[in-house]
Amino acid sequence: MTTPWADWDHVLKVDPDKSLVEGETFEDVCRTGTDAIEIGGTMDVTTEKMRRVIDACRKHDVPLYQEPSNPAVVVEDDALDGYLVPVVMNAGDPFWITGAHKEWVRIGDLDWSRTATEAYVVMNPEASVAEYTDADCDLAADEVAAYATVAERMLGQDIVYVEYSGTLGDPDVVGAAHRAVDDATLFYGGGIGDYDAAYQMGERADTIVVGDLLHDEGVDAVEETVRGVKDAHE
Ligand SMILES: CC(C)=CCC/C(C)=C/CC/C(C)=C/CC/C(C)=C/COP(=O)(O)OP(=O)(O)O
Ligand SMILES: O=P(O)(O)OC[C@@H](O)CO
Ligand SMILES: [Mg+2]
C-alpha cells in the first residue's frame, strides 16, 4: 500500500453507531476540509451500519477508509480507499495484537494493496477500547515513546497512533512519541474539541484524529479543528 497518510494533517473518524447532529448530512461531513475519513468505533458496529456510512460518502471525493474493530465487520466496497487495521501494542489480551488478525487472514481474502495497520497505544483507561482490549494504560511518557520505537523499528509499522479516545491527552506523552519515531506517521486522537486543542496536538503529532466532536457538536466545530492543525503545521 502507498502511504497517503504521510500528507494528512487531519482525519475525521466517523462512528457508524452514532448519528450526525440534526440537520447535517454526510455531504457536509465530506466538506469539512478533513484529509480523510476513517469509519470505525469500538462498540455496536455492524456491517450494515458501516455500509450506510460508506454509501453516504461514496460520491464525495474525500479518501475513505474503514477501521475495523474486528474481522466480522470488514466490508468490501470499491468506494473504500483501504483498510486501516488496529494493532494494539499495549493490549492485555494478545487477541488484539495478532489474534484477530490471524483469524481475519484465515477467513478473509485480503487485498494487501489496500490494507495497512496502525500501531495503537491506548492511553485512556475509561474508553471502551481500553476495556475491550484490556489495555495497560498506566504508562509514562518514556514507555509510550518506547512502544512507538518498537512499533516502527521492530515491527515495521508506518503509523503509530497515540489514542486517548474521549479525553484530551497529555501533550508531553504525544511529544515523546513523536520524537521517538523517524519515518512513521504519528497519529494523535482523543478529546479534540476546538481550534486550540487541535493546534496544541497538531504541534506534536503529524496527524490529528477527531471523532466524537462530529457527532456531538457538528461540522462547524470540526472545521475549526481542521484550521487548528493546519495552522500548527504551517
Ligand atoms: C483484524 C481486524 C480486522 C480487526 C482487529 C482490530 C483490532 C485489534 C481492534 C482493537 C482496537 C479497536 C476496537 C479499535 C477500533 C477503533 C477505535 C479505537 C475506536 C474508538 O473507540 P472508543 O471511542 O473507545 O469507542 P466508542 O466510541 O465506540 O465507545
Ligand atoms: O472521539 P475522540 O475523543 O475525538 O477520539 C478520536 C479517536 O482517536 C477515537 O478513536
Ligand atoms: Mg469514541
Image (tube, rainbow, N blue to C red):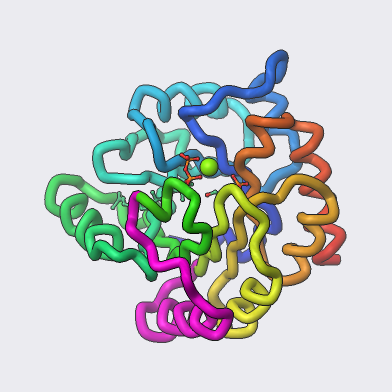
Left or right of residue 225, residue 213 in this image: left
Q: Closest to the observer: 130 or 99? A: 130
Q: Identify the residue at the far top of this view.
A: 23
Quarter of the figure with residue 221 = top right
Residue 20, given in percent of the width and then of the height, sits at 63, 23
Task: Tell me which residue sits at (45%, 64%) in the image.
Answer: 120
Residue 156 colored magenta? Answer: yes
Quarter of the figure with residue 13 = top right
Left or right of residue 174, residue 45 in this image: left
Task: Tell me which residue sits at (43%, 85%) in the image.
Answer: 153
**Image quadrant where one finds the C terminus:** bottom right
**Image quadrant where one finds the N terminus:** bottom left
Quarter of the figure with residue 112 = bottom left
Please say if 19 is above or below 67: above
Left or right of residue 220, residue 147 in this image: left
Left or right of residue 156, residue 171 in this image: right
Residue 231, given in percent of the width and then of the height, sits at 86, 59
Q: Closest to the observer: 149 or 113? A: 149
Q: Magenta segment range?
A: 132-159
Please say if 150 is above or below 160: below
- Numbered label tally: 0
Residue 206, given in percent of the width and then of the height, sits at 67, 67
Task: Tell me which residue sits at (54%, 81%) in the image.
Answer: 145
Please say if 52 is above or below 72: above
Please say if 184 is above or below 192: below
Residue 75, given in percent of the width and then of the height, sits at 33, 35
Residue 81 colored magenta? Answer: no
Task: Tell me which residue sits at (67%, 48%) in the image.
Answer: 35
